[in-house]
Amino acid sequence: MIKYTLYISFLVIILSMLWSCEKDDICIEETTPYLIIRFYDNSEPEEFKKVAALKVQIEGITGDYYNETITLLTDSIAIPIKVNDDITKFKLILNGSDNDLDNDNEDVFDLNYTREDVFVSRSCGYKSIFHDVITTLINDNENWIQSIQTVEDPQSIINQKSAHVKIFH
Amino acid sequence: MLKYSINIIIFLFSITLYSQSKVIDHSEYKDRYGLRVGVDIFQPIYSIFDEDKKGLEFVADYRISKRFFIASEFGYSEATNQEDFYNYYTNGQYIKVGADFNAYKNWLGLENVIVIGLRYAFSKFDQTVNEYTVNADPFLPPQTISTPVSYDGLNAQWIELVLGIKAEIIHNVFLGFSFRGNQMINSKEPENFKNLYVPGFNRVYLNDNGFSFNYTISYLIPLYRK
């Protein structure tokens, strides 16, 4: 009797050691959402229009934001938003990722927003979500972007299920 | 940790075997009934090695029949836990009340216990998120908030299944080890945080369960014989 019970309690202790790596040790939930932009045709506002050799930079940050979908011919991109500031200035450079420097056309737009930090889970910690998102295109006489607008009004960026900003070109 | 547990088990084996060598010759033997009080010695020792964890637990059981005991544990605990993107501090008190069944048939005059028990437990505690860094794309500069946020007046209730051993090492003095599987019934959760650690329950796993254990030394105050 005592033997069996000891074996059982021993087994339970061993099992409890194995529990120590659990599913909630790995962050699988969605954390801070990316800004999702879809590109539309300016002459046919319902139609998507791809952008050639796009390059994305964020003002104040050295280097290009690299994401395999951006450098290809693409009609949608997902780019990170600053979580330590209420404004992010994006530089979208048309033909910026090809070898020809002469055809580059840099357009800048501002994204203004308010931030809210939300607890996700043990392993993911906190994420930021964004409210009252406003986009402003900076005019430079040679804009390849005709206009920019948020999908909804007012626009919040809470998840990545659908696009947040439309760019017409 | 694993090595530690094995040592404890081996140690307890030897205690049990030792205790069995006592022989009492009584043709009509009456069992002793009484109150057993003790203290958990694991937590005070553990906090020497890990400054982030402190706690003290008292245990008591009272024999009500040949094989049943009313049992209780109560104590306090404070812990700072570090996760990938934040760290938080939990402190509070807890009480556990329930019954133990002795699954071991003792030889005459011996009072060792193999515990199979059940507890209802309640804890009242506060949580403080000391610091967190927003989980975001590392391409952009990180945002770290170092202003602590406190969540006071939280509580939790849970059920514990207890498996354990108590062996009399010297007259009236018992050494015990128990392992507990915990299942949360309900808890008052903070807003914009979670009860990830609860005093007495320890780490709260994804599906609201957890486990804990104690290693106790206790003294039996004999009250009467029956």
Image (tube, coloured by chain):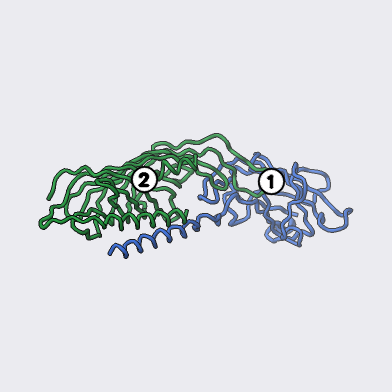
Chain colours: A blue, B green
Q: Give the camera-side residue of A100 and B42.
A: B42
The single residue placed furthest to the top in the displayed view is: B147
* Chain hosting mark 1: B
Query: Which residue is painted at 32% across and 41% down in the image?
Result: B58
In the picture of the structure, the residue carrying the numbered disc 2 is B156
Q: Earlier in the sequence, mark 1 or mark 2?
A: 1
Number of numbered callouts drawn: 2
Residue B172: where, in percent of width, then height? 24, 46
Number of other residues with Cα within 10 Å of mark 1, as a class: few under 14, some 14 to 19, many 20 or more: some
Query: Which residue is painted at 41% across and 43% down in the image?
Result: B43
Quadrant of residue B220 within the rendered picture:
top left
Q: Secondary structure at mark 2?
A: strand
Q: Locate the C terminus of chain A by quadrant.
A: bottom right
The single residue placed furthest to the left in the displayed view is: B28
Q: Secondary structure at mark 1?
A: loop
Q: Amino acid at mark 2?
A: Ala
Residue A40: where, in percent of width, then height? 71, 57
**What's the distance in space between the residues labelled 1 and 2, CA to CA?**
39 Å
Q: Can residue B163 be spotted in the picture?
A: yes
**In the rendered view, does A39 fall on the left or right side of A140?**
left
* Chain hosting mark 2: B
Q: Amino acid at mark 1?
A: Leu
Q: Give the camera-side residue of B129 and A9.
A: A9
Residue A130: where, in percent of width, then height? 59, 44
In the picture of the structure, the residue carrying the numbered disc 1 is B140
Between circles 1 and 2, the one closer to the viewer is 2
